[in-house]
Image (cartoon, grey):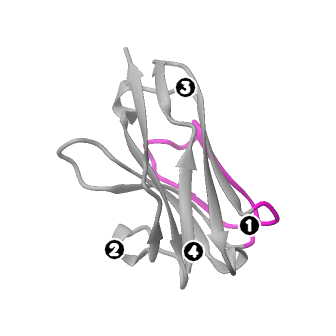
Amino acid sequence: QVQLGESGGGSVQAGGSLRLSCIASGRSFVTYVMGWFRQAPGKEREMVARISSGGGNRYYADSVKGRFTISRDNGEKRVNLQMNSLKPEDTAVYYCAALSRGLSYRAADYDYWGQGTQVTVSS
């Protein structure tokens, strides 16, 4: 089992940057695919970025390509999301999640979730 906790959210103006971190506790973090999702009010939870267990395979939603970077440090059991050139439409609660098998962009496939951190981008 894995417990996840996000940090780093906050309020910024458009064009600004934030760095989200997710710390995992429990065993076998290195075996999990890690994803960052977000959910805006009235919208479905959507994948923002995903990184494979070894870090060599990364996926980004089209809406964040070129602006967001996902990374992980298996020794520290941490996954980060660097968010640059933020836009008001990036406003959402951001969640990290762990997937024990395969590669997926579907929230329903992920096994463990953090509590979420709010990101607010003002114009």
Residue marked by disc 3: 85
Q: In this view, does 21 lie above or below 72?
A: above
C-alpha span from label 4 to label 2: 17 Å
Q: Residue at x 37, y 14 (%)?
A: 123
Residue 55 lies, with reference to residue 82, above or below; the image says below
Disc 4 residue type (three-letter) = Val
Q: Nearer the viewer, residue 58 or 31?
A: 31
Among numbered discs 4 and 3, the one appearing first in the sequence: 4
83 is higher (above) or lower (below) than 99: above
Residue type (three-letter) at the residue carrying disc 1: Gly
Query: For numbered disc 4, what is the local secondary structure?
Result: strand
The type of residue carrying mark 2 is Ala
What segment carries the magenta color?
54-76
- Determine if the magenta segment contains residue 5: no
Q: Name the residue under label 1.
A: 56
- For the point 22% across and 41% down, the residue is 41
Instruction: Indicate the position of residue 15 as horizontal and vertical percent values.
Output: 52, 19
Label 4 or label 2, whichever comes before in sequence order: 4
Q: How crowded is mark 3: few (under 14 residues within 10 Å), some or many (20 or more)?
A: some
Q: Can residue 83 be seen in this view?
A: no
- Residue highlighted by disc 4: 2
Q: Mark 2 points at which residue?
A: 108
Quarter of the N terminus within the rendering: bottom right
